[in-house]
Image (cartoon, rainbow, N blue to C red):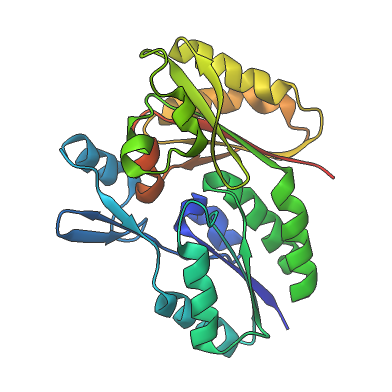
């Protein structure tokens, strides 16, 4: 019986890559006033950042309903598949809990495993891809789950932000609140630790912040896969990926974009690097 991997839209996986590996993406939602949109379905990043720039209030975000997960699980089960469902850190979103409830609603406990990745964005995406590759070569549900659990602690993320204001206003600032009240003109670099946002470094300028991202990567000697993720600066992300190519021995660097839900918290101008260390 084939295994299919499910994730959510905060994985920021390029759609072509998700299709290539048969990954099902369940969208979270973002709401401007009375208008609600499914992340990456009804509202793409370009339109979202345009709306964000013209909005006086931060949009609201919400996880998928348990029913949305149940529908996905039931459809895959009818197709003869077991399911590994891997999601954004439970400390940042209720998506993982909604997925667990969805499994209960669907009454497919033996065919669906749900994993709290403790990751976000393309960091989550890299763990999901590793699991999907294992599923693609015929691994069992237990085996695919083990691949995911082994990959998750080897994923690293560093994100350079133009401002902490969006994280602060959105209530997802976590330990990075330690940066608030310090230098007003700093460019903060944050990371994920134990599933929540932590401060990593302060950069005085944006170019110096990019140099620090490169330095963080250059200190790793066993990088199996890497990605660059951005909110509004595609050319900048592509240039950073080009600089980092020497640090990856095989394959190409994945370039993803913060979708509407994560864009609500990182804001315009964000630039991140994610990498998965080898075993």
Pick the quarter of the image with the N terminus: bottom right
Q: Residue at x 36, y 33 (%)?
A: 232
- Judging depth in this view, the residue of 198 and 102 nearest the camera is 198
Residue 109 location (% of width, % of height)? 63, 84
Residue 190 seen in render: yes
- Judging depth in this view, the residue of 130 and 151 nearest the camera is 151
Residue 14 seen in render: no
Left of 216 or right of it: where is 106? left
Q: Residue at x 44, y 31 (%)?
A: 177
Pick the quarter of the image with the C terminus: top right
- In the rendered picture of this protein, how many numbered marks are placed on residues? 0
Q: Residue at x 24, y 56 (%)?
A: 31
Residue 135 location (% of width, % of height)? 72, 68
Q: Residue at x 46, y 23 (%)?
A: 179
Q: Looking at the image, is 99 positioned above or below residue 32?
A: below
Q: Of all residues shown, which one is farthest toward the right?
A: 279
Q: Looking at the image, is 235 positioned above or below residue 16?
A: above
Left of 169 or right of it: where is 195? right
- Judging depth in this view, the residue of 37 and 94 nearest the camera is 94
Image quadrant in which you'd find residue 4: bottom right
Q: Looking at the image, is 170 positioned above or below residue 133?
A: above
Residue 35 location (% of width, % of height)? 17, 59
Left of 267 or right of it: where is 196? right
Residue 74 location (% of width, % of height)? 52, 86
């Amino acid at each position: 019986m084939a295994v299919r991997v499910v994730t959510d839209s905060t994985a920021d996986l390029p759609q072509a890559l998700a299709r290539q590996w048969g990954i099902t993406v369940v969208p979270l939602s973002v709401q401007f006033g009375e208008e609600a949109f499914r992340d990456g379905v009804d509202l793409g990043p370009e339109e979202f950042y345009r709306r964000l720039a013209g909005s006086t209030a931060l949009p609201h975000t919400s996880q998928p309903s348990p029913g949305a997960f149940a529908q996905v699980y039931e459809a895959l089960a009818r197709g003869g598949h077991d399911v590994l469902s891997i999601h954004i850190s439970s400390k940042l979103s209720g998506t993982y809990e909604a997925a667990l409830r969805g499994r209960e609603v669907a009454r497919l406990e033996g065919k669906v495993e749900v994993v709290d990745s403790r990751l976000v964005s393309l960091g989550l995406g890299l763990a999901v891809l590793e699991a999907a590759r294992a599923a693609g070569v015929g691994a069992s549900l237990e085996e695919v789950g083990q691949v995911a659990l082994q990959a998750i602690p080897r994923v690293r993320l560093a994100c350079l932000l133009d401002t902490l204001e969006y994280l602060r206003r959105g209530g997802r600032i976590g330990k990075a609140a330690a940066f608030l009240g310090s230098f007003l003109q700093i460019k903060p670099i944050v990371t994920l630790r134990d599933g929540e946002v932590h401060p990593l470094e302060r950069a005085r300028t944006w170019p110096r912040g990019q140099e620090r991202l490169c330095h963080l990567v250059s200190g790793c000697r066993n990088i199996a896969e890497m990605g660059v993720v951005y909110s509004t600066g595609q050319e900048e992300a592509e240039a950073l990926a080009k600089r980092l190519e020497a640090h990856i021995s095989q394959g190409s660097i994945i370039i993803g974009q913060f979708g509407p839900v994560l864009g609500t918290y990182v804001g315009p101008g964000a630039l991140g690097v994610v990498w998965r260390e080898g075993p």
